[in-house]
Image (tube, rainbow, N blue to C red):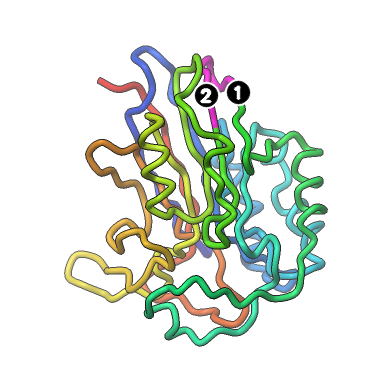
Amino acid sequence: MGYQLREASVPVLPQGHAPIRVLHFSDLHLTPERAREIADIKTWAALKPDLVISTGDFLAHPDVVPVLIDALGPLLDLPGLFVFGSNDYYAPRFKNPLNYLKKDHGKRVLGPNLPTESLRNALTNRGWIDLNYVRTTLTINGTVIEARGTDDAHLERDDYSLVAGEPGRCDLAIGVTHAPYLRLIKEMSKDQLDMIFAGHTHGGQVRLPMFGGSRALTTNCDLPHWRARGVTRVDGEPWLNVSAGMGTSPFARIRVASPPEVSLITLESSL
């Protein structure tokens, strides 16, 4: 297994509700040559999730959509939610890695267009729900979940007003987005969501080893470094799970103290 399984339990369900196992993956940055990653993706069905959530950046190559769909395999027969990241629209290009440590001035180096609509159609044709600017309701293990999503905040495609508002009648309200910018967390907090799922950070990708763990050098957004991966919570805000993701840009295939990962989050009844 070439990845870390990050497991956590989060007490967000009403009392008496059955647990829900959520497989959350992000940032595959997949190319046809990534044989190890493709093989790893094919193992995820054995985790037996009840719901699958992807927070984008599926692609890193124009010809990889059929490879991705084959790798996901049986997971596409389960309830699934997805949003897009920048690399679902534009292919990666070489960037100076040191720029990630500088202040973000909003300038983006975009590569050639990727087959976004082919990806969208391939996933929705198998029953997964496209949450880009969408609110929807689904029932998992008897729990009514309202889910809402935005497109990629890193490309400033995150018009939250299109999905804003307090949840309707549901047992659990979740938000799904690619890049966990604080403006989105703030707006979702105002709407009293229970949990947010995001990716984008790669867990820092290069982390500084420290006694008892490691520290991210960047999140590539304005999220504090200590929240670069895993489940965290700030008072008055929803729970947040940030997936450190599976892949990297083809031009920066190095991860230090931040191994590829997929999350298995068990949503449980609160005490």
10 sits left or right of 136 in the view: left
**SS type, badge 1:** strand
Residue at x-position 67% and y-position 65%: 30
Q: Residues within 10 Å of mark 1 (few under 14, many from 20)?
A: few
45 sits left or right of 264 in the view: right
Q: Could you say where residue 8 lies in the image, as x and y percent from the top left? A: 36, 42
Where does the magenta region start and end?
139-147
The disc at residue 174 is none
Vertically, is 65 above or below 184? Answer: below
Residue at x-position 36% and y-position 27%: 12
| Residue closer to the observer: 162 or 44 | 162
241 sits left or right of 94 in the view: left
Image quadrant of residue 156? Answer: bottom right
Label 2 sits on residue: 145
Q: Could you say where residue 197 lies in the image, as x and y percent from the top left? A: 47, 44
| Residue closer to the observer: 187 or 250 | 187
Vertically, is 130 above or below 118? Answer: above
251 sits left or right of 6 in the view: right
| Residue closer to the observer: 192 or 52 | 192
User: Which quadrant is the C terminus positioned in?
Assistant: top left
Q: Could you say where residue 2 lies in the image, as x and y percent from the top left? A: 52, 65
| Residue closer to the observer: 205 or 263 | 205
Image quadrant of residue 135? Answer: top right
Mark 2 and mark 1 residues within 8 Å of each other at the beta carbon = yes
Label 1 sits on residue: 138
Image quadrant of residue 163? Answer: top right
Residue at x-position 36% and y-position 71%: 218
Which badge, 2 or 1, is on the more N-terminal residue?
1
Q: Could you say where residue 201 lies in the image, as x and y percent from the top left? A: 45, 63
Callout 2, which amino acid?
Answer: Ile
User: How far apart in space, not on screen, are marks 2 and 1 (Cα)?
Assistant: 5 Å
Residue at x-position 50% and y-position 53%: 262
